[in-house]
Image (cartoon, grey):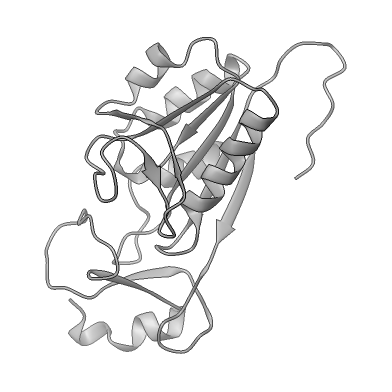
Amino acid sequence: MFIEPNLSGERRGWIEVICGSMFSGKTEELIRRLKRARIANLRVEIFKPAIDVRYDEQNIVSHDENAIQSTPIDNSQTILLLASEVDVVGIDEAQFFDDQLPEVCDQLALRGIRVIVAGLDMDYKGKPFGQMPFLLAKADYITKLHAICVKCGNIANYSYRTVLKDGQVLLGEKESYEPRCRTCYHENEPDRP
């Protein structure tokens, strides 16, 4: 990723979005970028939605158990209150936040803060998920990650729900979802959960 040098001395912020299906490594990439920012002695603050308690109530944890300390919050406006005097803000599971998140990210970037957001770009029905389409539209940098299809081994960008449950939000892992490529995702459409 190329970042223009700022010769004026003025601190400039931007928004980076990491997206993809479940099991594509979004949280792993978010943690990697945030740890590198800390190595560079930047002040980092990290947030996750309070409803995401799958691995840990406090920490952001990837599927392969990499973890980083975070602050669980119920409302994206809280980020503006808690992110003063920082250089970098990390936000995980952005699809679960309220509709103010894109504006909050904009305000942070305008304050000169680097904002790194990770989340599912599509729900299990293959539809844009939550605020992610709006964040993608506002992003300065976008990284789309892919998983590996469990059916055929090709790249996967769909999260296939394997259990019969209604509702867009179902917090789950390998017992509820599997990554699939476009072809394998659509092959069971008539009888999909």
Instruction: Decide which of 61, 26 is in the foreground and name it.
Output: 61
The image quarter containing residue 4 is top right
Residue at horizontal 55%, vertical 61%? 145
User: With respect to residue 110, does 52 lie above or below?
Assistant: below
Q: How many marks?
A: 0
Instruction: Locate the N terminus by quadrant.
Output: top right
Q: Give the image location of residue 29, x and y in percent.
A: 56, 50
Residue at horizontal 34%, vertical 52%? 129
Instruction: Decide which of 94, 33 is in the foreground and name it.
Output: 33
Q: Give the image location of residue 123, x and y in percent.
A: 32, 59
User: With respect to residue 110, does 38 lie above or below?
Assistant: below
Residue at horizontal 25%, vertical 50%? 54
Give the left or right position of residue 41, taking residue 126 as reference: right
Q: Give the image location of residue 105, x and y in percent.
A: 48, 27
Residue at horizontal 44%, vertical 85%? 183
Q: Give the image location of residue 93, x and y in percent.
A: 37, 44
The furthest residue to the right: 7
Give the left or right position of residue 111, taking residue 59 as reference: right
User: With respect to residue 99, does 176 lie above or below?
Assistant: below
Instruction: Decide which of 119, 174 is in the foreground and name it.
Output: 174
Instruction: Locate the C terminus by quadrant.
Output: bottom left
